[in-house]
Image (cartoon, rainbow, N blue to C red):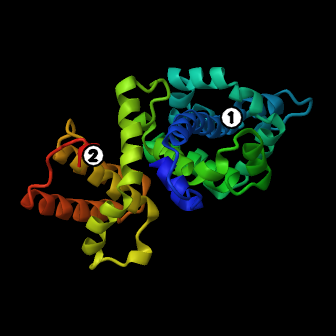
Amino acid sequence: MQLLYAIEANNSENGQPDFSQLEKRLRKQIDQTRSLTAFLLLNITEIAGYAEAYAQQRASKNIRTTDDLNFNIKIAGNEIVWKIKENEGFKQVAADEKINEYINKDFIRKKFLQLIDTQEYIKYIAEQSRDRKSESEILHFIFTDLLESDEDFLQIIEEYFPNWDDDCDITEIMILQYLQKPQSIDFSESISSDKWQYAKELLRTSIEKEDFLMSLIKPKLKNWDAERIAQIDMILLKMGICELLYFETIPTKVTINEYIDIAKDYSTKQSGQFVNGILDSIHKELLSQDKIQKKDFRKK
């Protein structure tokens, strides 16, 4: 999905695609995206964790006030922050890619000082208890309002991650999804041979069958405003139809349900309903025409 999104967004693929190069690009992108995601999460955890260092600095001053001695470090114990820090896969990626070396300590301090002056932070520490929603919301705020809006931070990302321009939209979705559901990304999972084969075939089929896939989709869009359809939704539809038609080991019900869930998690609020409606309609049509035979697409 991510590579197809990047190809369409850049509109840079002309003529017959070089699939060997696309496969290399896909594999590299899988690795780069994981590293970029880990780096962004690390910055969030570093900002939250800086509360402890800041509290120690204030407590060690020669002339201390009551506020200095009682600085609130609730955010350093944020439950999602600790799930990230204790995730073995995350720690392994951080070590392998040496992303800790990319962390700018002065920048982390600056962002933390900005954070503690915000109403969002003041509201967060005022709550005595911890709940999943507030734990997620404060990290969401750090990411979207303090990091993504900072030009210096964007320059840091671009310096170390040349894939940022292609991956920024998808990575943002992944980060926000992760802050809602920390189990949604398995950093430790290496791509197995069967998954890699599936990924390559799905990429190839989605590109080679573009015209055919759109011929199935376009007639179903009469009740939808085409200009308001998210690009990711269209990509998901094409990928879903490919699975319905050409991947014999994947049950059609599983395909439809999974793409509905992906649309809900990674696209707009209306995407789940949209993908559900279009895929279900196409599925029924193909069944009625006895076209879902689960044959290899190269034999079609």
Say above or below: 193 vs 263: above
Query: What residue does disc 1 label?
Result: 46
Tag shown at residue 65: none
Give 33 or 211, whichever is nearer the viewer. Answer: 211
The label nearer to you, 1 versus 2, is 2
Residue bearing mark 2: 297
Q: Position of residue 194 (x, y in %)?
A: 34, 27
Mark 1 vs 2, N-terminal side: 1
Whether residue 113 is visible here, answered yes or no, is no
Q: Amino acid at mark 1?
A: Glu
Residue at x 85% of width, y 27% of height: 60
Distance of label 1 from label 2 (alpha carbons): 48 Å
Q: Quadrant of residue 201?
A: top left
- Residue 32 location, x and y as percent? 60, 36
Residue 142 shows in this picture: yes
Q: Is residue 236 above or below residue 111?
A: below
